[in-house]
Amino acid sequence: MRIRVNPNLCQGHNRCFSLAPELFEVDEFGLATALNDGRVPAGMEEKAQLCIDNCPEFAISEIED
Amino acid sequence: MTDTSKNENGCPVHDWATDYDVMDEGYTRNPAPIWAELRQKCPVAHTTRWGGSWMPTRYADIQEMANMVPTLSSRAISVIPPDPVLREELIAELKAYGTESPPITSDPPEHSPYKRLILPFFSPRAVAGYAAMTEEICRGLLDELKDRDTADAAVEYAQQIPPRVIAYILGIDMGRAAEFTQWTQELLELGQTDPELRRAARTKIRTFFFDQIEHRKQNPGHDVISLLLDAEVEGRRLSDHTVAGICNLLLVAGIDTTWSSIGSALYHFATHPEDRKRLVAEPDLLPVAVEEVLRYYSPVTMARKVTAEVCMHGAEMKPGDKLLMTFPAANRDPEVFERPDEFVIDRQQNRHIAFGTGIHRCAGSNLARMELLVGLRLWFERFPDFSLAGEEGVTWAGGQVRGPRNVPVRLSA
């Protein structure tokens, strides 16, 4: 599974980071990027989906690997 | 539709689509059925009460409106307009300084540099640094309750946490927490229907921060006020007026709101033993449960001022009109949330916008979330079997910040 944070949509809510700090990093303004170039480690898929489903800006999506 | 004992002019609401009342006691206690009806019948409702405003209730509309900047301007964020005296004061200040309490009262392009100025104080990393201090505050409050059978979870716990935390961050006297809470309540809650109280509270807060600013100029420290005095926006130092405005924002924005959320959470778990037991058994569920608390009991409604004609679902909004950003109503929209009026403790799909959305999303959400997580975790460790000691003792505050102001509980089974 591979995910991406759209930097044009992210407003820095930090919802993804608070639910799965293993999958994202955020800068001091809260803007998020997916760690490991968006590749979700095995076993973390559910958490990744949780983050996708909790972003209020619809900024996180699954992408083709 | 609801019993109405305390409306503007004492006149009950007959039609919520054309005559809603945000201060109505029945609405404050249980707004969801009214939103559900409006979402179907009249998705952007109108009223002439309290200075007049428009109220959207659908998630998609509120998302769209939040992004209509600066057509929907943040220069007026209170639903109820200031009285003529305060209005004159605000106009004179705006003329002299160009800004009030940035970034919350700012539109682009003024907004972004101020938002970037304050965001680092509330980044996940910065907030992690405040967790130990928050734990200490909560433990101290819980120790006070240790030999008691009953307590007011709102007054004696929820209300006490946020003013101490923000006082610590701002580097002001935590011992004055009760005063900070009182000022905030006078400004945002009681003052909304009492212009003199609102004006007096604003003056108290500003005067307090002007004194703090003078003190920091003589004795600079590492607190947020000192950092703001040292900061530059677009190559220029901030005026004392602007620093005081930002401090005013940081103080009041984190008190009523977070206190309301912690109180709502305690009210919920005091009245829903099955959810309480599940959280005791599965403490790892807390982060997801907190998001559901934020969705179901969203405390904050902001306002915007219309600056150009906007038409939506037949609502013709004109320049000068007020518009409510009814985030709590958006969070109950069945188009976006399954079983929206049920509290689902492990809700997976939860794109709630309790902290707003778009460029004005809450700057302090990480702090609020940390206070909720720490405050609830420690409460549950100490009082896993607590329950409500009588619904009749529960009171709710409404207007722009909704939350329980009294939650009497039995501390053990």
Image (cartoon, rainbow, N blue to C red):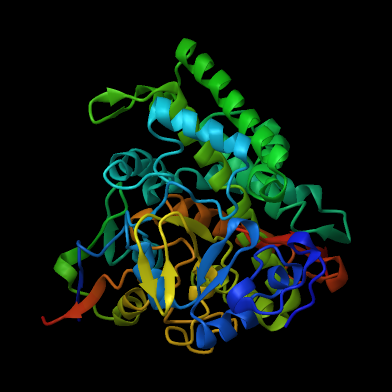
In the rendered view, tell whether residue A13 sits above or below residue A49: above
Q: Quick one: which residue is furthest to the top in this view?
A: B218
Q: Where residue A10 appears, x then y in whole percent? A: 27, 62
Q: Is residue A56 visible?
A: no
Note whether residue B157 is visible. Answer: yes
Give the position of the C terminus of chain A as an image quadrant.
Answer: bottom left
Residue B7 x, y percent position in the rendering: 76, 64
| Nearer-the-camera pick, B90 or B317 | B317
> Quadrant of the image for the N terminus of chain A?
bottom left
Q: How many numbered badges does the structure rendering display?
A: 0
**Which residue is rendered at x = 74% and y = 52% of the image?**
B142
Between B87 and B158, the one nearer to me in the picture: B87
Q: Where residue B163 sits: x, y (%)?
A: 63, 42
Q: Is residue A56 left or right of residue A27?
A: right
Determine whether, in the image, residue B115 is placed left or right of residue A4.
right
Question: Seen in the image, is B163 located left or right of residue B140?
Answer: left
Check the image and report above or below for B189 versus A13: above
Indicate the quadrant where residue B198 lies.
top right
When the figure is inspected, residue B161 is found, relative to residue B248, above or below; the finding is below
Horizontal and vertical percent position of residue A28: 30, 46
User: Residue at 68% across / 37% down in the picture?
Assistant: B177
Q: Is residue B258 above or below residue B18?
A: above
Quadrant of res B272: bottom right
